Image: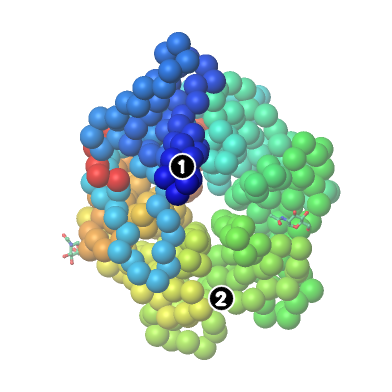
């Protein structure tokens, strides 16, 4: 009896674990990212991936792309899957091929912030500054025409207009949030809407001291429903909960004089899953990192002196951090993207650094970049009125 029960149990287990071929073809193995199933005439054959490759979260079979690591805010013992990764040095232009400004769907005029919606097919959203609009490019068809998803109704302060759009964020429901700097507002355009509404009035109703006038970028931390703005004139970072006009100063309080407590000219912010705040302090030629709740910054990139060597920056305007804590810094006046690993004491130029110009390996006053889910880098090239994509190079790693 016991034997029969055990047999039944084992049979059930093997049924639960057995892969059922719904069609012939190749399928990810739901139980192991290092192998996949080949279904032939309805029979599954388990096939191993070549060493180091995995089936990634998009269901691509045996890709070199590592899967997302589990966030661990306590220990920093994360394996860095992109420690030595490199990117193609020539970009592909996805919009603005002729480096001319324009208003049609294949042109931009002074592009700014860029966001890649990794939850929806890596769709690319670009702030098109002097056209007072945000353009969307489909991730699966990057060269196709841009679609206006916010603004596009001239320079102004009406709900359907933008005045100085600087940055863009897209939430899980594809609603678009635009940092509309000189209108002192974050304007939300619900998905598909022809007009926006003000989600945050940054000059708001809170204490006068906590109001933000002009800002150069915006970061939305969706987990905590909070916007972070670098307040360039008051030299600090202020946060606003979505839907509230009451700002709270996060770092850079008046009165502190220690270099670790102050910011010289904050232009970019990034907040990771552990609520670690990174500030691109363009005026301090450095990147400051603040652990959650701390107002004491740690310089994690830059040696404080403006310059062009491996430890220096010239106006590091914005920063992105990947899931392994590698930092990607848009080093605007050096015309390059610098990558620093989480414990590095020097950076590596991965893109640009070839002077200003319109060649495919050059940037001409770039201020913003973004990473897609595979780690490809997209850069808005302000002076060339274009967006370039730089492909990540395959690398066999143990991740
Ligand atoms: C946008 O309009 C404002 C007035 O509302 C004006 O001061 C500003 O120069 C205009 N911007 C451009 C680029 O024309
Ligand atoms: C932000 O707030 C608006 C209302 O002001 C709301 O419609 C939207 O869903 C909120 N966004 C998120 C990501 O919660
Ligand atoms: C970078 O340049 C500065 C100033 O000339 C110098 O002090 C520093 O040692 C240089 N760093 C490296 C790594 O070359």
SS class of the residue under badge 1?
A: helix
**Residue that mark 1 sits on:** 4
Q: Please name the residue shown 30% across and 45% down the image.
A: 399
Distance Cα–Cα, label 1 vs label 2: 65 Å
**Pointers 1 and 2 in contact (CB under 8 A)?**
no
Residue 209 located left or right of residue 390: right
Q: Position of residue 315 (x, y in %)?
A: 40, 58
SS class of the residue under badge 2?
A: strand
Q: Where is residue 197 in the image (x, y as percent from the top left)?
A: 81, 52
Residue count near mark 2 (Cα–Cα under 10 Å), binned few <14, some 14–19, many ≥20: some
Q: Where is residue 263 in the image (x, y as percent from the top left)?
A: 46, 73
Report the front residue among 136 and 393: 393
Nearest to the eye among marks 1 and 2: give it: 1
Residue 393 located left or right of residue 130: left
Q: Can residue 50 be seen in this view?
A: yes
Report the front residue among 375 and 386: 375
User: How many badges with numbers are in the image?
Assistant: 2
Report the front residue among 329 and 366: 329
Q: Can residue 390 be seen in this view?
A: no
The image quadrant where one finds ligand 3 is bottom left
Report the front residue among 212 and 395: 395
Which quadrant of the figure has residue 388? Answer: top left
Q: Earlier in the sequence, mark 1 or mark 2?
A: 1
Residue extending furthest bottom? Answer: 255
Does the Cβ of the disc 1 residue fall within 8 Å of ligand 2?
no
Q: Please name the residue shown 59% across and 64% down the image.
A: 228
Instruction: Check residue 250 in the rendering and tell me which mark sits there, or answer none.
Output: 2
Q: Please name the residue shown 40% across and 25% down the image.
A: 37
């Amino acid at each position: 009896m016991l034997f029969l029960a055990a047999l039944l149990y084992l049979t059930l287990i093997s049924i639960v674990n057995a892969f059922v071929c719904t069609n012939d073809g190749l399928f990810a193995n739901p139980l192991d990212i290092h192998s996949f199933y080949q279904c032939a005439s309805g029979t599954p054959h388990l096939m191993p991936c070549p060493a180091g490759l995995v089936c990634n979260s998009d269901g691509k079979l045996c890709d070199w792309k590592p899967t997302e690591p589990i966030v661990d805010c306590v220990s920093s013992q994360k394996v860095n899957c992109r420690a030595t990764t490199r990117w193609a040095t020539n970009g592909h232009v996805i919009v603005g091929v002729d480096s001319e400004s324009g208003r049609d769907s294949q042109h931009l005029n002074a592009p700014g912030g860029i966001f890649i919606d990794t939850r929806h097919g890596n769709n690319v959203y670009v702030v098109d500054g002097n056209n007072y609009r945000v353009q969307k490019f489909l991730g699966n068809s990057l060269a196709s025409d841009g679609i206006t998803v916010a603004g596009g109704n001239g320079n102004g302060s009406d709900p359907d207009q933008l005045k100085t759009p600087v940055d863009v964020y897209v939430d899980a429901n594809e609603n678009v949030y635009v940092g509309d700097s000189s209108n002192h507002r974050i304007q939300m355009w619900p998905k598909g809407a022809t007009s926006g509404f003000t989600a945050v009035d940054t000059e708001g109703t809170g204490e006068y001291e906590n109001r933000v006038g002009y800002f150069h970028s915006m970061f939305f931390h969706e987990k905590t429903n909070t916007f972070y703005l670098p307040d360039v004139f008051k030299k600090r970072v202020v946060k606003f909960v979505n839907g509230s006009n009451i700002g709270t100063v996060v770092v850079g309080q008046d009165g502190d004089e220690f270099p670790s407590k102050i910011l010289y000219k904050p232009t970019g912010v990034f907040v990771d899953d552990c609520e670690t705040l990174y500030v691109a302090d363009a005026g301090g030629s450095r990147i400051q990192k603040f652990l959650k709740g701390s107002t004491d910054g740690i310089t994690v990139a830059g040696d404080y002196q403006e310059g062009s060597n491996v430890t220096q920056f010239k106006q590091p305007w914005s920063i992105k951090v990947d899931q392994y804590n590698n930092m990607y810094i848009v080093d605007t006046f050096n015309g390059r993207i610098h990558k620093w690993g989480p414990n590095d004491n020097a950076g590596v130029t991965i893109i640009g650094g070839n002077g200003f110009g319109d060649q495919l390996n050059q940037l001409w006053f770039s201020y913003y970049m973004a990473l897609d889910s595979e780690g490809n880098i997209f850069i808005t090239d302000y002076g060339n009125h274009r967006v370039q994509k730089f492909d990540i190079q395959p690398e066999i790693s143990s991740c």
